Amino acid sequence: MEKMIFCGKPMEDLVEDIRKFHGHIAPGLVIGGFMVDWALELLGDIPKIGAIVETCRCLPDAIQVFTPCTYGNGRMKILDWDKFAFSLYDKKDLKGFRVWLDLEKARAFPNIYNWYMRLVPKKDLPLEILLKTIMEAQRLILSSCRVHVIAFYDEKKRGLTRVCPSCGEAYLAEHGNSCLSCQGKGYYT
Amino acid sequence: MEKMIFCGKPMEDLVEDIRKFHGHIAPGLVIGGFMVDWALELLGDIPKIGAIVETCRCLPDAIQVFTPCTYGNGRMKILDWDKFAFSLYDKKDLKGFRVWLDLEKARAFPNIYNWYMRLVPKKDLPLEILLKTIMEAQRLILSSCRVHVIAFYDEKKRGLTRVCPSCGEAYLAEHGNSCLSCQGKGYYT
């Protein structure tokens, strides 16, 4: 039997990539892998892809593992909307596809629906059962549509920096006459 | 000659990991690799590490590639301060180490100082020259100190979600009676 290929890899490699990067096999990331696989297929051969992710939970890691878009390279934007959805688009013409977990379709897979809607306690839905359902469902729980991105697509330019007279480190000039840490707004003692 | 090991890997693997994840070999990520290597050595054997990064540029990817902390697993927090610094800390007692690019020390390596302070145009400082200097400098351009983290350490709990009556997708309930997209605040048409 021919191996099924997702995001350019056999399924087991995809799951292993998730485990290595994310630290554990999160169900949302496996669904995310199927979502990215579909979005990339819809997009076709695009030299420079951008990503907008509509949740900060799990899904950003699927984007980072399976696309060239990362937080640090500025090509993945994250919206704290808690929507299980993202768009991948062509950075040149801003056209692309949004893919999302379609709750109506997910109803046909109660394990997935109940997990996502938090209707069953974790202990009553073992990970392996949930993963098995996700592998069966693949794209059957997803929807997609064409989008034209109209916001959040610009790569942030590096702002003016200044050397803090107090700590001697470079910081974002717009923060004031010294860096936020030296203004007492730091996160450590 | 024995290979030098950084973040548990020979240097060439570390650089290849950066290229694969980030898309290209960004000098800041190579410095970031040395920073993570040092911070991990200082921290010692900690079961659960957290990270706070003080810039959204490049450095978050060094954290994601070389530590178990990622954006999607909630263990990396990012502050938009444009400071070339981060802290790695023990999630249990919130104690750890901050490592930063020390500008005073970097003056001894003009290629690095000039690159970071944007004092020379990119075309006058070829990547291979800059990388060579970074490889020579290693930790000589860095400083570190012990920190006790007092903010940004909590892992965000998933908020209450609701199904949007307009699009049928789950969204963060606190956003109102429908999701932000359906309120006309979306990023696509």
Image (cartoon, coloured by chain):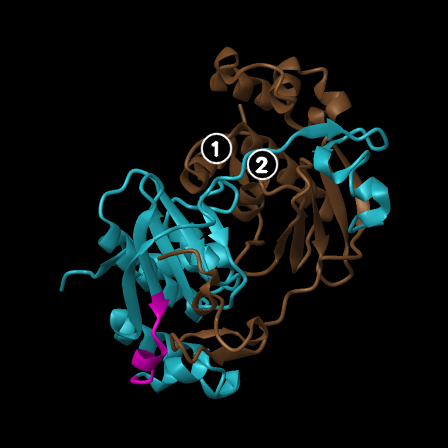
Chain colours: A brown, B cyan
Q: Residue furthest top?
A: A124
CB-based contact (under 8 Å), mark 2 and mark 1 = yes
Q: Residues within 10 Å of mark 2 (few under 14, many from 20)?
A: many
Name the residue tied to disc 2: A33
Residue depicted at 48% across the width and 39% down the height: B155
Position of residue B146 relative to residue B90, above or below, is below
Q: Position of residue A178 (x, y in %)?
A: 48, 75
Q: How many numbered markers are drawn?
A: 2
x 77%, y 22%: residue: A104
Residue closest to the far left: B1
Q: Nearer the viewer, residue A51 or A12?
A: A51
Mark 1 surroundings within 10 Å by alpha-carbon count, few (fewer than 14), some (14 through 19), many (20 or more): some
Given the image, what chain letter belongs to the residue carrying mark 2? A
Is residue B101 part of the magenta span, yes or no? Answer: yes
Labelled disc at residue A15:
1
Q: Chain of mark 1?
A: A
Residues drawn in magenta: B100-108
The earlier-in-sequence mark between 2 and 1 is 1
Q: Is residue B151 visible?
A: yes
Instruction: Give amino acid for label 1.
Output: Val
- For the N terminus of chain B, the quadrant is bottom left
Element class at badge 2: helix
Residue B10 visible in the displayed image: no
Q: Position of residue B57 (x, y in %)?
A: 52, 64
Residue for point 53% across, 21% down: A131
Is residue B95 part of the magenta span, yes or no? no
